[in-house]
Image (tube, rainbow, N blue to C red):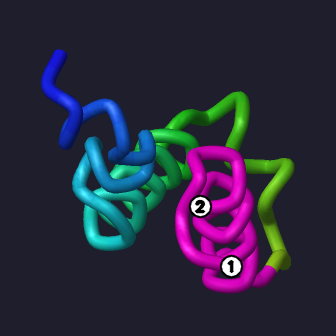
Amino acid sequence: MSAEHADQSLYDSIGGGDALRLAVDRFYLAVLADPQLAPYFEGKDISAIKRHQVLLLTTILGGPQ
């Protein structure tokens, strides 16, 4: 592993915010299409849930605060 790559956070190595937003969007597309899971999200602000998920993953993966 190069020194440059070793200094890179997981957040950066997976593609940063754009990659996380895409992953979270795809995840919730699948969740909301699932007849067993979708009812848990009825009436919920999915946009807010997705924003929160991206922020959580950003923090966990060493992204910007």
Count of numbered badges drawn on the protein: 2
| Residue at left offset 84%, top offset 77% | 43
User: Alpha-carbon neighbours of circle 1 within 10 Å: few (<14), some, or many (≥20)?
Assistant: few
Q: Which residues are magenta?
A: 45-65
| Three-letter code for the amino acid on which mark 1 is drawn | Gln
Q: Secondary structure at mark 1?
A: loop
Extreme-top residue of the structure: 1
Q: Secondary structure at mark 2?
A: helix
Location of mark 2 (residue) = 58
| Three-letter code for the amino acid on which mark 2 is drawn | Thr
- How far from the left and from the top, in percent, is residue 58? 59, 61
| Residue at left offset 32%, top offset 55% | 12
Q: Main secondary structure of the magenta part?
A: helix
Q: Residue 65 bears which disc, if any?
A: 1
| Residue at left offset 34%, top offset 46% | 8
Left/right of residue 11 with respect to residue 3 in the rendered view: right
Q: Considering depth in this image, is 21 or 25 the residue closer to the camera?
A: 21
2 and 1 marks in contact (CB < 8 Å): no
Query: Which circle's residue, 2 or 1, is located before the other in the chain?
Result: 2
- How far from the left and from the top, in percent, is residue 24? 47, 55
Q: Considering depth in this image, is 31 or 18 the residue closer to the camera?
A: 18
- How far from the left and from the top, in percent, is residue 56? 73, 59
- Identify the image quadrant of the C terminus: bottom right
Q: Is residue 50 above or below residue 62?
A: below
| Residue at left offset 83%, top offset 76% | 44
Left/right of residue 41 with respect to residue 64 in the rendered view: right
